[in-house]
Amino acid sequence: MSTRSGSLTRAIAIDALTHVLTRNIHSDVALEKLFANYPNLRPLDKAFIYEMVFGSLRWLAKMDWIMSHMLDRSFSSLDPRVANALRIGTYQIYYMDRVPERAAVSETVEAVKQVGVPNAASLVNAILRRVAKKSEYFPKPDKVTQAVDYYSMHHSFPQWMVERWYKQLSLERFEYLLSNNNRIPKNSLKLITRNPLPEGESDLATYLLKTQSIESSWRPMPGALRIETLPKFKECEAFQKGCYIVQDEAAQLATSLVQASPTDSCLDACAAPGGKSIYLWESGVEPQNLTVCDFAQKRLKILRENFSRMRLEGVQILHGDVVEQCQGKIFQKILLDAPCSAMGVIRRHPEIKWLRTLNDIQNCALEQTRLLDGLAKNVAIGGELIYIVCSFELEETINQISSFLEKHQNFEKINPQDRIHDFYKKYVTRDNELLIYSGNPDDIDGFFGVILKRNA
């Protein structure tokens, strides 16, 4: 592959998009693997590639709609590399104002040659030149009579998601959910006070501004810091000393539903990569009373690395299916961050739009049921099972808990109000459940959480 930077960055973006959409893998994983092949890529180049890939995934349906009115054949009939080159090029033209249109066209055409489809260069050139005019009219579905088609195209979501939410939500929440899920999300940090800041520092926000020029603001959630850009972790002494973790406000809020004393035995049932376990430790749970388990060996490796950076030692770490690994064990508190569809974090992982299916939601719900039923017997009498997922889908949230309580009548829901900061109590439902739809005014992830207490 040529080392010409303009076409190289676009070729990597085309490859990444192709890997994501044809191999069903996350975009950050695809990019990490590709970047490993190009050790000399500048941070600026990587950022440019990230924007092209994530932006193309966010606006995929809208760009495909445009393409469908440009081609004299079905867009889906194109070689995936050609289709993705057109998406990458169209995204630059429509959404990246700082990229000259001439460069967007010419460099993307060169990139097509580099990814192995040189015969398509003339087609890509002709289509992108037409796109660059931006003056051609593309008929749009009618918002009233073709509502699902309209919202699917206009906000770039698959039709099955649009149809589902259109039926379930109020129009105001529905439109807000679609529009705000296409915004680039900000990140939040969780302050870890067990590890003091570097000598002479007393405030993490001031430290980040002084050492990395990162603007930030403290949030109502205790210890939560909203940041404008991610720190350069390798160069950040506070990160290396375990003074904070990257964790969205919603995840912090959901984890705060666990209220454990230092002597309570606690299980983090699906623990990797370890952020919620670290939160529990920060909130007072002693390491010797904390057990963590995860099925994925690779993710457990990351968990161990995170624990090491925190100087968190003495935790019992189990590998495998948590129901099997914990047979016969009793815990006062169990945190089950169950595998889910992740529909609440689409804004962070826009490929979820195109990789997820309705069957995936149903299959996740089945696995959640198995885990809930399996772990119910591990809860001490008077103890609590805290169930959380980064989803707001009915099968994984309200309906899941309703079904659980029907089968396990020795459990009851506990009102979480006393465990939640006043600012966030608006997310507690009348049924004593924490329910956050993504695309909310506070710009936090979609999440669900409930406290289930086991009675005698």
Image (cartoon, rainbow, N blue to C red):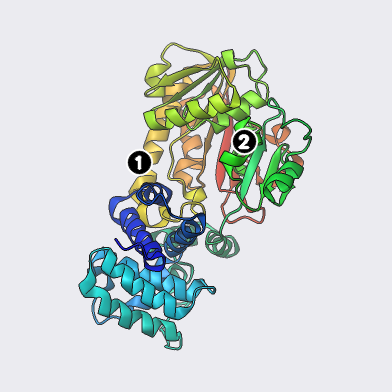
Q: Amino acid at mark 1?
A: Asn
Location of residue 271 in the rendering, given as x and y in whole percent from the top left corner: 49, 29
Q: How many marks?
A: 2
Write down the residue under mark 1. Answer: 363
Sequence order check, earlier mark of 1 and 2:
2
| Above or below: residue 303 compared with residue 223 | above
Location of residue 209 in the rendering, given as x and y in whole percent from the top left corner: 73, 48
Dot 2: within a 10 Å radius of its alpha carbon, few (fewer than 14), some, or many (20 or more) residues?
some
Quadrant of residue 202 in the image? top right
Quadrant of residue 307 in the image? top right
Dot 1: within a 10 Å radius of its alpha carbon, few (fewer than 14), some, or many (20 or more) residues?
some
**Is there any visible trace of residue 374 in the rendered image?**
yes
Which-is-in-front pick, marks 1 and 2?
2
Is 289 placed left or right of 91 in the picture? Answer: right
Instruction: State the quadrant of the N terminus.
Output: bottom left
Location of residue 325 in the rendering, given as x and y in whole percent from the top left corner: 40, 17
**Is there any visible trace of residue 296 in the rendered image?**
no
Residue under the point 62% across and 35% down:
239
Residue under the point 65% across and 42% down:
428
In the picture, the disc for residue 239 is 2
Is 246 placed left or right of 298 in the picture? Answer: right
